[in-house]
Image: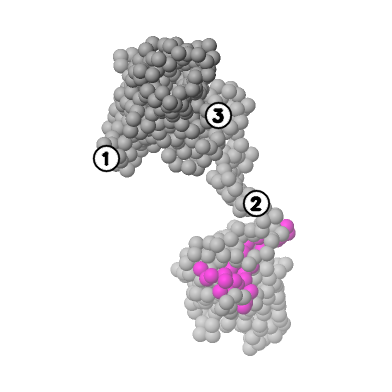
Amino acid sequence: MSNLKIAKLPGIAEDRYVEESLYDIYEQLKRGFIDDWTYAGEITFEGDMTFESEVTFEDEVTFNEIINAGGGISVGGDIIPDTDNTYDLGSSSLEFKDLFIDGVANIDTLAGTTMSGNLAMGDNNITEMGNITGTDVDISAGTGTYTSTGTITSGDITIFDATPILVFKDSNSLGAASVGYIEWRDSGGGRAGFFGNNSAGNDDLFWKNEQGGNIGIQTTGAGEVQITSNVNITGTLGVGAITLNDATGVILSGSSGVFTMQGIGGSNNENWTINLESIANSILFSTGTGVTGTDWNADFFVGGRFGEGNRTLPAAGTDHRIRVYSDDTTVNTDYIEFFHNQSDAIIANGSGQIKLDSASSIIIDADNSAIAFADSGVDGFALGIFDSSDQLLFATYDTTGNQIVIGNVNNFFKDFDHALQTNPTLFVHSDLDPDISNNQWGSFAHDQENFVITTGVNVGTGSSPTTDENAIIFAPRGTERMRLSGTGDLFWTGAGTGLLYACMYVDGTQAIEVALTSGVIAEVKDDGTTSLDDGWLAGDLNLITFPTGGDEHYLSITKAGFYRVQWSLSFNTANPGANVEIHGGIAVDGTAIRNKAEAHRTIANNTDTGNMSGTAIIDCPNGTEQISIWLLNSTNNADVTVEHGNISMVMVGGT
């Protein structure tokens, strides 16, 4: 069949063009309607067409104007516009009711308000979609991804999958400052809580209730909450029990400020408790009350891994202790432990020294019973009993002053201006600040030959130097008795001080007549028969005595030693005859000393008064010796009358 071209609506006969003989169709068209006809050729309509009955086109049909089809249009091929992206299917005021597509709908943009039924996208993505609302939304992503930058408002969201996963992601990579979270809001839009990270700067994950309520994790029956990584609890641990390891039966429980860890089997011996409530302002750490001699699981073991390097708990006993090891797990003696043995508090170590700070300022050497002091690790001073000896040693170091300074605590951080000493030296300072004047001190040292006692200089140095005698004073019983001046002079002060000394004398008001036999020594004393008067009188005495009771003729010493003894006599004889020779000297315990301090003279007549004297150093080893004077007439038996006499002595050394 040939082509048919119609330029006007049927019923306007003058506007028809028939290229082939179609008289029978024309007759029907002329009457103004088409009654079930089929044309197999190509037809072009250039005017408006109204079909009031069914028309079937089996070939290409071109409509250049509006088609009014009251009974519907059925096509057997494609409907294709002659220009892309130009014509509409319906309008905003005249919309099609339903759209049925069995194949693929290729739509650049889909705009709508309500969708019923299922929308299956296969492996393709839905992008730049507005809000999705509804009671049930089924998104089957397949291998694709549902991506939304808007807001999803929904009721329940149900994910049915063998391994369901809900993923949300922020814009940063792992390790970067991340923000992303699931948020709960109240009916007014305020945030009630969130799960995730809502703060840039870290990768922490939080589950937070911002309304002051609880976050609970609960199981039913025999269920459990399992945590396989580290746990940091910054809030309050509620009442109940947490099983840390079901295989060993370790249980944590907390109530009313008491936190208890229960050991294997739950026996009382194995409990460990942290009590924050029993004692005000205190934290109590305690173990079970039934600890036995071998049940040391009740003690504290800190550091390394228990059992490595043969590390053990403290030895069996009855007293709890804390043992702390180093991080070196290859040895088992690098620890310190603390305990009380029911009598004393004990700090013990397995090896090395106990240092009270990392700079080793104070070191305790338990093996040598010693303690050492240092400044930033530099040796300064040590005190202890070394090598199990019977001595307590104060030790200094050649490289750090070699000195010990005793001063006031107010000057604790001052430099006392002493140079490095050759030998260990003890300096004792006054209370005066050494920055004001640094000369008020005395010291003790041994210079490898002599023991040296010295003092500071006469005029010090400092902000206000003082001028001081800096003498060495000896003050037994709190009273000064002897002073060695700064210039080397030695003084005694106070009554009865100084060396031992004494004297006795015969004055001119009384005399002693000594009966003599030729060649026989006799002491100068009052024998009660021949004495003219009372005899000897006591002079100044210091720790040497003079007897009383009728036999006053000697001085009695009280301390053993060497004494310097001086004596003198003025005497005459009655009827001496011509040239009588009289000898005299010192007697010890009544025995004449003939080889020391002996003197003699010749008396010509009875009016001749002779004088004799002598000096000697006498050894008195017993400390009880009696010192007197003796006379001897080597010529005849004439007696001697002593008119004046004197004997004095002073201790000059020990024996």
Question: Answer yes or no: do the residues labelled 2 and 3 have beta carbons within 8 Å?
Answer: no
Dot placed on the residue nearer the N-terminal end, 1 or 3:
1
Judged from the image, the secondary structure of the residue bearing numbered disc 3 is loop
Let me know if residue 440 is in the magenta part.
yes
Q: Residue at x 49, y 22 (%)?
A: 17
**In what quadrant of the picture does the C terminus appear?**
bottom right
* Magenta residues, dominant SS class: loop
State the count of labels.
Answer: 3
The residue indicated by pointer 2 is 378
Q: Nearer the viewer, residue 483 or 366?
A: 366
Residue 579 in the image, given as x and y percentages of width and height = 72, 82
Q: Residue at x 33, y 23 (%)?
A: 97
Amino acid carrying mark 2 in the image: Val
Dot placed on the residue nearer the N-terminal end, 2 or 3:
3
Q: Nearer the viewer, residue 283 or 146?
A: 146
Dot placed on the residue nearer the N-terminal end, 1 or 2:
1
The residue indicated by pointer 1 is 188
Q: Residue lying at the far left in this picture: please name it.
A: 187
Q: Which residues are magenta?
A: 431-459
Residue 299: quadrant of the picture: top left
Residue 287 in the image, given as x and y percentages of width and height = 38, 27
What's the distance in space between the residues labelled 1 and 2, CA to CA? 70 Å
Would you place residue 55 above or below residue 84 in this image?
above
Q: Residue at x 49, y 33 (%)?
A: 86
The residue indicated by pointer 3 is 304
Amino acid carrying mark 3 in the image: Gly
Foreground tag (1 vs 2): 1
